[in-house]
Every structure is written in structure tokens, then in C-alpha cells.
Image (cartoon, rainbow, N blue to C red):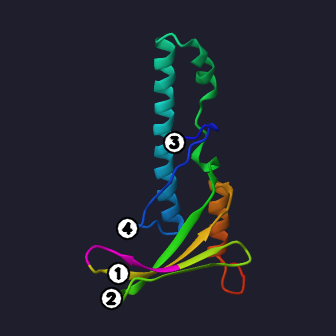
Amino acid sequence: MHNTNTVSVIVACTLNPIPIDMFGLIKLSSSLARVEDRLQLLVSEYNATSIQSGRQQYLSLKLKSKIPNHMSWIVKMWHFGKDALTRYSGEKFDMSWEDSLNVFYHIYSKEYGKKKMNVRNEVQEYPNKSLEDTFMDKLEVDDEDNNGNKHS
């Protein structure tokens, strides 16, 4: 919760990544819908408690405290990672760089338990768009080949 009337939601899925396909996006959307419902429940309970305890200044909150639909939430940043198929047993490493389009690339060794490491290639993007628009952009990019040609 921020004092600017906003809430940050962080989805961490390092060990169980969400694939960027229709099923993965449905899984992410349904998870965020549950977060939306739980936030609305918390706000509603807080407002009800405030009204019952006589803090009438919170009455206006009840009218203004509808949590927006998760598809309208703004995606500030997200990471897309892909692990190498083989295990890695060398020293840990971490390399990163940013390109002229403000896309951040990160290649590093990711440890899973005792001495089990993979090499992970990760891209960090900053869409600053609604979840719906960000999903549509990502699906359009995934439908294009390396030459920018769209496929159905």
C-alpha cells in the first residue's frame, strides 16, 4: 500500500514460471483476479469496521473504494526468463546490459537447491500499460517471426 492511493502487486514465480502463451496468460489473469477479490474484501471489511466504530469520515471511502478490474492494472515492469536445458556447475556469474529501446537483458546462474544451477537468460521490460494492453502486445510479438511477419 502506498500513500498515493495505489497498491503494488508483485508476482514472484522463479521456481514455477508462467509461460507466455494463452494458457499462461489465463493462469496469470486468474491469479490476479483472486488478488483483486481479496483486496476488495479487505477494503470492504475495513470500511464496515470504520463505520461501525463511529468513524463517519470513512463513509465516503465506502463509496470510492472499488478495487479496479485487474485487467486495467498498470504493468510497470515484468521479467521473462528462460533456463538452459543443461545444468551448470561452474562459478556463479551475473551479466546485464540495457539497449537503446530501454530493454534490460540479464544472463546469470540461478541456483536451485544444493549445487544445482542453471543458466538463465532474462529480459526485463517496462510496458507502463494496462495488463490487457500488455498481454495483447506480448501475444502479437510472439506471433511474429524474426523478420516481423505475423503468423496466425
In the rendered image, the residue lying farthest to the top is: 54
* Mark 2 or mark 4, whichever is nearer to me: 2
Q: Callout 3: helix, strand or loop? A: helix
| Residue at x 61%, y 41% (from the top left corner) | 6
Residue 48: % across, % down: 48, 19
Provide the residue designation for mark 3: 36
| Residue at x 66%, y 84% (from the top left corner) | 145
Check if mark 2's residue and mark 1's residue have beta carbons within 8 Å: yes
Near-viewer residue (53 or 83):
53
Q: Which mark is residue 117?
A: 1
Magenta span has 142?
no
Q: Which mark is residue 89?
A: 2
* Mark 3 or mark 2, whichever is nearer to me: 2
Check if mark 1's residue and mark 3's residue have beta carbons within 8 Å: no
**Label 2 vs 4, first from the N-terminus:** 4
Type of amino acid under label 2? Ser
Distance (Cα) linking label 1 and label 3? 35 Å
Q: Callout 2: helix, strand or loop? A: loop
Near-viewer residue (16 or 24):
16
**Label 1 vs 3, first from the N-terminus:** 3
| Residue at x 38%, y 82% (from the top left corner) | 118
Provide the residue designation for mark 4: 15
User: Which of the image's four quarters has the N terminus?
Assistant: top right
Q: Callout 4: helix, strand or loop? A: loop
Distance (Cα) linking label 3 and label 2? 41 Å
Type of amino acid under label 3? Glu
Distance (Cα) linking label 2 and label 1? 6 Å
Residue 87: % across, % down: 34, 86
Type of amino acid under label 1? Met
